Every structure is written in C-alpha cells, then in structure tokens.
Amino acid sequence: MTTWLALDIGEKRIGLAVGNDAARLARPLRVLTRRSKNEDFEAIARAMQEVGADELLAGLPLNMDGSEGPQAKSVRKYAERLRRRLQVPLRFHDERLTSFIADQILAGRSTQKARRQPNDAIAAAAILQSFLDQLLIDA
C-alpha cells in the first residue's frame, strides 16, 4: 500500500491532502502559507511523517490544451527541488478543473464563513482523488 501526500502548489499557499491506493479515498489535510522554500519543505516533510506518506503527488496546472505554461513550469521546478530535498518519489498529475471542483464543494457548505475558507486543501484532495481514480482505471 502506498500513502500519498498531494500538493496543490500555489504562489501564496500550498494545499495538502492525503490518501492511499488501498482505500482509494483522498481527504484534505491542511493549507500551508508559503514562506521560504526551507520552511515550506520542512513543513511538508513533517506532514509526510505525520500521515506516513511514502510518495508525493503534485498537481500540475496545465493549460486547457494540455501544454505547460509558466505556472506549470514553476510548479514542476519547485516540486523537483522538494523531491531532491526529501529524497522521496514524486509524481505529477493534471490539475485542470480541480480548483473548480473545490469551489463547488465550498459553495455547498452551509455557512458563509465555511464558504470563504481557502480551497487549496480541497483542491489537493481533488487532484489526489483524480489520480487514485485513474490508478483504478489503469489497473
């Protein structure tokens, strides 16, 4: 069984989610406010240890035509540095439309305060759930 820590890497925040390939269910974990790369990497390493994650999954913000723009290249560079620092396996997964899914989930919440929460961890869970669903299809 592999446990994944999924990352939705943004310019200001990083959403974290966790799931494994046995249960095939992702759940939001938390949102990190980005600081320095060292602080971010340490916080992600602690989160991996906390949930017993074996591998990282980073959402890759591809353009709608599937090409990589500047944001995808920035995410790829950041995640590769993280992989080298933590010495763990890393995969990327197309994150197109996952922010939309996260916004839809938040819109369905009952209170205005709950709807205003950052969607980053929910987006990370949507990325991971899509990845886990694809593993099932490919099996």
Image: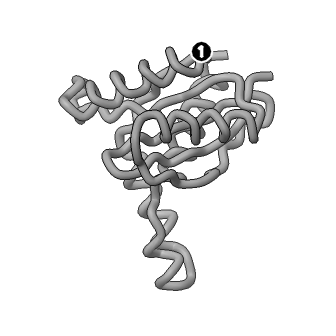
Which quadrant is the N terminus positioned in? top right
Place of residue 20 in the rendered image (x, y in percent of width and height, measured from the top left): 73, 32
Q: Nearer the viewer, residue 50 or 18?
A: 50
Q: Is residue 29 above or below residue 3?
A: below
Q: Position of residue 16 (x, y in %)?
A: 56, 45
Q: At which x and y percent is residue 76? A: 35, 23
Instruction: Name the residue located 71 percent from the left edge and 30 percent from the top edge.
Output: 53
Q: Quadrant of the C terminus?
A: top right
Residue in view at x 70 percent, y 38 percent: 19
Which residue bears the numbered disc 1? 87
20 relative to 90 in the view: left or right: right
Identify the element where label 1 is drawn.
loop
Residue nearest the viewer, comparing 52 with 105? 52
Dividing the picture into quadrants, the one containing residue 79 is top left
Tell me residue 132's x, y (percent).
Answer: 62, 31
Mark 1, Cα crowd under 10 Å, few <14 / some 14-19 / many 20+, is few
**Foreground: 128 or 116?**
116
Residue 51 relative to residue 68: left or right: right
- The quarter of the picture where residue 54 lies is top right
In the image: residue 43, left or right of residue 97:
right
Q: Identify which residue is drawn at 64% across, 23% down.
A: 55
The residue at 51%/64% (across/down) is 105
Give the quarter of the image for residue 36: top left
Q: Is residue 5 left or right of residue 103?
A: right
Image: 121 above or below 5 = below
Q: Amino acid at mark 1?
A: Gln
